[in-house]
Image: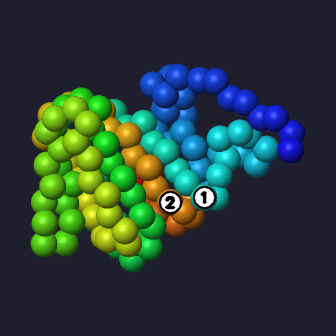
Amino acid sequence: MTEQIYVGNAAADAPAGRGWLLGHFQPAGDPRHSDEVEIKWAIHPRDDRRAQWVSGERRSAALILVSGRFRVELPGRSVLLAQQGDYVVFHGVNHSWHAEEASVVVAVRWPSVPGYALPRSDNGTSGS
């Protein structure tokens, strides 16, 4: 196997990929390309929210709070991540989210499959 190494900074690299650092959307041959897993460094301003629920979800996800106060909406349940290190894991569950305070969240999803991102808004951002 050819050795592939990438060294970066999540805060610096994240804006180029709407926060996603690793996954199917990275170019083939890039050490950050993966069809197995996605990793996101998400910086959310206060009151940021996903524009619509993810529906038809078949992936698994883990969201880990680095800082702030972040709410994950699941069918019939609302989970508040309020202390550094709080996390939620779900498998094949439709969901949405809301940043109650400015928040930094690490999201890990698997497998890495296309088709869930919201279209970019006029300001170039997306709610995925």
Q: Which badge, 2 or 1, comes first in the chain's sequence?
A: 1
Which quadrant of the view contains residue 68? top left
The residue labelled by disc 2 is 110
- Mark 2 secondary-structure assignment: strand
Q: Residues within 10 Å of mark 1 (few under 14, many from 20)?
A: few
Left or right: where does residue 39 sit relative to residue 88?
Answer: right
- Residue at left 79%, top 44%? 29
- Residue at left 38%, top 40%? 106
Q: Is residue 15 above or below residue 60?
A: above
Left or right: where does residue 99 sit relative to residue 31?
Answer: left
Amino acid type of the residue that numbered disc 1 sits on in the rendered structure? Glu
Left or right: where does residue 2 sit relative to residue 60?
Answer: right
Amino acid type of the residue that numbered disc 2 sits on in the rendered structure? Trp
* Image spot of residue 99 (x, y percent): 19, 42
The residue labelled by disc 1 is 36
Using the rendered image of the protein, determine whether residue 82 is visible from the camera's viewpoint.
yes
* Image spot of residue 103 (x, y percent): 24, 33
